[in-house]
Image (cartoon, helix red, strand yellow):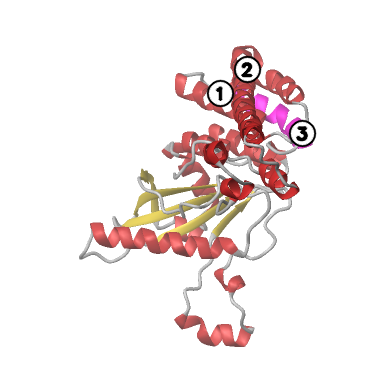
Amino acid sequence: MATKANSPHDGIFKSAFERPELARSELALILPQAVRAHLDLDTLHVRPGSFRDEDLNQSHSDLLYGVRTTTGEEALVFVLFEHQSEPDPLNMPLRLLRYMARIWERWQIEHPRAKLPIILPVVLHHHAAGWRTEPDFANLLDASPALLEAARPYLPLFRFVLDDLGPLSAEAIAARPLHELARLVLLALWSSRSLRRLEEAAPLVAAIIAKLARDESVRALLRQLYSYWLRTGPADVDARAIQAILLEVAGPQGQEDVVNAAEQLMAEGEQRGLARGRVEGRVEGLRDAIVAALSTRAIPLSEVGRARLAACGDVATLTRWLTLAVTASSEGDVFGGSEAP
C-alpha cells in the first residue's frame, strides 16, 4: 500500500489489509465467482511497490497482491482504496489504467521474457452518497454507443470490481461473511464521517470487539481504529461525543486505549497550534522590523507597499525585504522585483 503518513485512512489500511487473512476475506467476498474460481486465495501475499501519482492527495491508498491461479500461474490483484469526500467516477478508471500500465512495466523489467500477468482492479468506496455510475472505463469516452461498440476491439475498455459501502446499512456490513477484523475496519470506514452512523454502528462494533482475542497486533489495530474515528469525525461534532461512544464500544479492556488516542490527538493539535503561532509571531515581527527600518531611513510606506507587506506571510520573503530595507533609499528598493506570495 502506498501511503502518506499524514493520512488516517492510510494508517488503517496499511495495518488492516496488509494482513493477508483480512484481504483474503474481502476479496473472496467481492470478486466475481467466475474469477474467484480460478484463484487460489490461500496463496495471497502483498507485493511491494507503489504505482500512484506522486501528487495525489492523501485520500488514496493502493495495495498490490500476488496470488497464484488454481493451475499455478501468477496473477496480480490491484486494490485501490478510494477515500475521496465525493465519488470520482470520471477520474478513477483513468487512474486505474495508469496504475495497471505501471505494474505491467515493472513486471516486464523484472520478467523480461515472460508474458504479462492478469491484473484485477478493485475499488473500495465508502462515501455515503454511493458510487453513481457503472464501474466502467467506457464512462470516460465521448462516443455514441454505436461508435463505442465498433471501436471496442481497439480501446483499453475494462470494468473494475467495486465494493461500494456507502449505501449499505451497518447491519449489512456487520453480517458480511468476513474476517472479524475486516468487518470492523469496514464499519469504521462506513461510520467515520457521521455521528449518526457511528451511533448506529456502535453496538455492532462493540459486539465484534468483545469477541476478539486481544493479542498485541489486534490491540495495535484497535488503537489505530480509535484514533481514526477521532481524527475523521465531522468537524461540527465535539470530539468528546465521539470519545464517549468509543469508550462504550471499547469495553473495560480498551478504554485506556481510547483515552490515550484522544490525548495524543489533543497533543498533536496543540503542537500544530504552537508551531502555527510561532510562525505567525515571526511573520508579524518581521513586518514590524521592515516598517521600523524604513521609518529610520525616513522612507514612508505607500498604501500599495502596506498592502504587499500585509499580504505576505512567507518568512523567507519578509527576511529578504528586511535585509533590503536596512540600506534602501526608496520603497522600490525593498519591493521592486519581488513578488509577495
Q: Identify residue for label 3.
A: 195
- Mark yes or no: residue 117 visible: no
Q: Neighbour class for label 2 at 10 Å: few (<14), some, many (≥20)?
A: few
At horizontal 56% and vertical 25% (from top left) the residue drawn is 222
Where disc 3 sits, the SS reads helix
Coordinates of residue 322 in the picture (x, y in percent): 56, 37
- At label 3, the amino acid type is Leu
Of marks 1 and 2, which one's residue comes earlier in the chain? 1
Q: Classify the position of the N terminus by image quarter.
A: top left
Closer to the camera, 56 or 272? 272
Q: CA distance from mark 2 to mark 3?
A: 20 Å
- Mark yes or no: residue 17 visible: yes
Q: Is residue 182 above or below residue 155?
A: above
Q: Neighbour class for label 3 at 10 Å: few (<14), some, many (≥20)?
A: some
Of marks 3 and 1, which one's residue comes earlier in the chain? 3
Tell me which corner region of the image, top left, top right, bottom left or bottom right, holds residue 44: top left
At horizontal 55% and vertical 38% (from top left) the residue drawn is 7
Coordinates of residue 102 in the picture (x, y in percent): 38, 60
Q: Identify residue for label 2.
A: 263
Coordinates of residue 39 in the picture (x, y in percent): 39, 54
Closer to us: mark 2 or mark 3? 2
Coordinates of residue 254 in the picture (x, y in percent): 60, 16
At horizontal 58% and vertical 87% (from top left) the residue drawn is 147
Q: Identify residue for label 1.
A: 223
- At label 2, the amino acid type is Glu
Closer to us: mark 1 or mark 2? 2
Where disc 2 sits, the SS reads helix
Q: Which residues are magenta?
A: 196-209
Q: CA distance from mark 3 to mark 1?
A: 19 Å
